[in-house]
Image (cartoon, coloured by chain):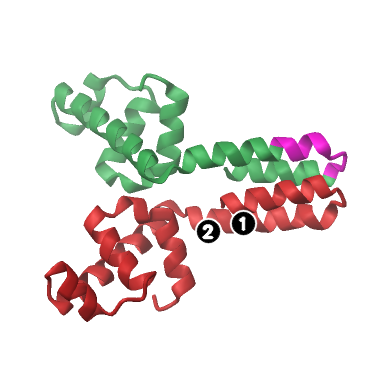
Chain colours: A green, B red
Amino acid sequence: MDNIIERGRLYDYYGGLLTGHQRQIYEAVVYDDMSLSEIAAEHDISRQGVHDLIKRCDKQLARYEEALGLIKRDKNVDSKLDEIALLSKDKKIIHIIDEIKDML
Amino acid sequence: MDNIIERGRLYDYYGGLLTGHQRQIYEAVVYDDMSLSEIAAEHDISRQGVHDLIKRCDKQLARYEEALGLIKRDKNVDSKLDEIALLSKDKKIIHIIDEIKDML
């Protein structure tokens, strides 16, 4: 789970199922790239505590995808949209495809 | 939450987050249309216990959608696909749109 894109994607989909506290710390580390020590000091918990929380969140997010498979499904939808884009010469259609891709 | 379609849709998306026990009973009542008393006897719990479990699951499923909004998002994707279908005369594109709609 060292892949930042995969992490970001899991968080995009399932972050809403984490607690507010988890989200705050997770975002600080994964998105704002703050160090564990910085976060620890800011939230008055141990560095190890931050580390464990992040690990737990990663596992939880991965389990949500395992249970629901929505990221995998959307990857397939995305491929199908590419097929349409290849077949179509209509600019309006290409534009709508872009809109859908932005939603996924 | 008496709408069977909405219930089915919520379950399709988020049922994977319920426990196996919850799923078994929820499906028996909501999909197989068994009576609460039948399920209660089969699982050796009270009729009230089944009733409460179903209610709790309904609430939980609704909360997942509230937190993640993926059903709402997919409804928007579906509308956009309809727009493409209206614009396109290519049978191959229409076919791919159907495939995508089946995934949603």
* Rendering quarter of residue A74: top right
Q: Position of residue A95 (x, y in %)?
A: 77, 43
Left or right of A95: which side holds A7? Answer: left
Say which element carries label 2.
Answer: helix
The verdict on residue B85 being magenta is no
Tell me which secondary structure the magenta stretch mostly adopts: helix
Q: Which residue shows up at 55% across the image and 54% down it?
A: B73
Q: Quadrant of the C terminus of chain A?
A: top right
State the residue in front, B29 or A68.
B29
Task: Name the amino acid, label 1.
Answer: Asn
Task: Name the amino acid, label 2.
Answer: Lys
Label 2: chain letter: B
Which residue is disc 2 drawn over? B72
State the residue in front, B98 or A24.
B98
Label 1, label 2: how far apart the Cα atoms are: 7 Å
Q: Is residue B37 above or below residue A8?
A: below
* Rendering quarter of residue B60: bottom left
Numbered mark located on residue A43 in the image: none
The verdict on residue A84 being magenta is yes
For label 1, the crowd category at 10 Å Cα-Cα, with few meaning under 14, some 14 to 19 and many 20 or more, is some
Numbered mark located on residue B76 in the image: 1
Q: Which residue shows up at 64% across the image and 48% down it?
A: B100
